[in-house]
Each structure stands twice: as C-alpha cells, then as structure tokens.
Amino acid sequence: MIEKPTFEAMPQIMARLEEKVDALTETVGKLLQGAMAPMVVTAPEEMVTVKDAASILRLSVSRVYALVQEGRIPCYKPGRNLLFLPSELRKWMAEGLRKGQPSIEEQMAQMTKGMRNSAKDRRFI
C-alpha cells in the first residue's frame, strides 16, 4: 500500500520530484533535437534535358527518345520538353543490370519444375 507522506518528509519528496522532472526535461530535449535533425530541407534535385540524360546514360539522344517512347525510362513532360531526374536515371541503370546466363543444371531444373515424371529422376546411360 502507498503510505501517506508526512509533513516532515515533504522536502525529500520534493527533491526527488525535482530530480525526476529535470531528467525528463533533458530526455525530451534530446528527443526533440533528434526529431528536428532529419527535418533539414535540402534543395530539390535539378532536372536535366534529353542531351544531359543521354550523357548520363552514355546513350545517343535518339536512343533516349526511343526508350521514352517505349515507356522504359523514367521521365517527365511538363510541357513540350522531356525532363529527367539524374538520380532516377542512375537508379534505372542500376536496376537494369542483366544477370549472366544460368548453368545447364539450373536451366534443366527450371524446365522440369512441376513435372510429375521429370527428367531429373531419370538416369541417362
């Protein structure tokens, strides 16, 4: 059970409460500093033209137009001109990496996957 504080114990109780309030104030201050740090506003990335996009991608301008027409490359068309974000172009290039050709065993496993009498169960002599 909680004991009722006496008048004589009040100074000690007030001192403990003051320490706890100070600790809470310090903790809240640290949390606010941490929460405010990511809110730093950076300048928006500047968009580039087709020529700049072609140089970033190391492609010809006509090839960039062809990729835009196919819908394979990220772009923006606010008016008559095509605009690109360099970060999106670099991400698109990174995601476009091709994997090497799978080994014969991997191809065979893929082809026979789901077959009842698969060739993997047969032994070739």
Image (tube, helix red, strand yellow):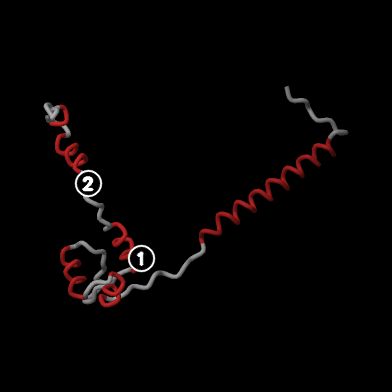
Residue 37 vs residue 82: left or right? Answer: right
Q: In x, y percent, where is residue 94?
A: 32, 59
Quarter of the figure that contains the N terminus: top right
Which residue is painted at 68% across and 50% down in the image? Answer: 26
Label 1 belongs to which residue?
87
Compute the Cα span from label 1 to label 2: 31 Å
Kindly give the residue lying farthest to the right in the view shown.
Answer: 8
Q: Residue 64, relative to residue 104: is it above or below?
A: below
Measuring from the top left, give residue 14's x and y in whole percent.
80, 40
What residue do we see at 24% from left, 73% from top?
Answer: 82
At horizontal 26% and vertical 77% (from top left) the residue drawn is: 51
User: In the depicted view, which residue is nearer to us: 6 or 116?
Assistant: 116
Q: Residue at x 17, y 34 (%)?
A: 113
**Residue 46 screen position, x and y as percent:** 37, 73
> Is residue 122 left or right of 3 when viewed as pictured?
left
Residue 46 bears which disc, if any?
Answer: none
Quadrant in which the C terminus appears: top left
Secondary structure beneath dot 2 equals loop
Closer to the camera, 125 or 41?
125
Q: Are marks 1 and 2 in contact (CB under 8 Å)?
A: no
Residue 89 left/right relative to 29: left
Q: Quadrant of residue 83?
A: bottom left
User: Which residue is disc 2 drawn over?
Assistant: 102
Mark in front: 1 vs 2 = 2
Between residues 118 and 29, which one lies in front from this camera angle?
118
Query: Type of residue at label 2?
Result: Pro
Image location (x, y in percent) of residue 119 = 13, 31
Q: Residues within 10 Å of mark 1 (few under 14, many from 20)?
A: few
Residue 52: quarter of image: bottom left
**How packed is label 2: few (under 14 Cα within 10 Å), some, or many (20 or more)?**
few
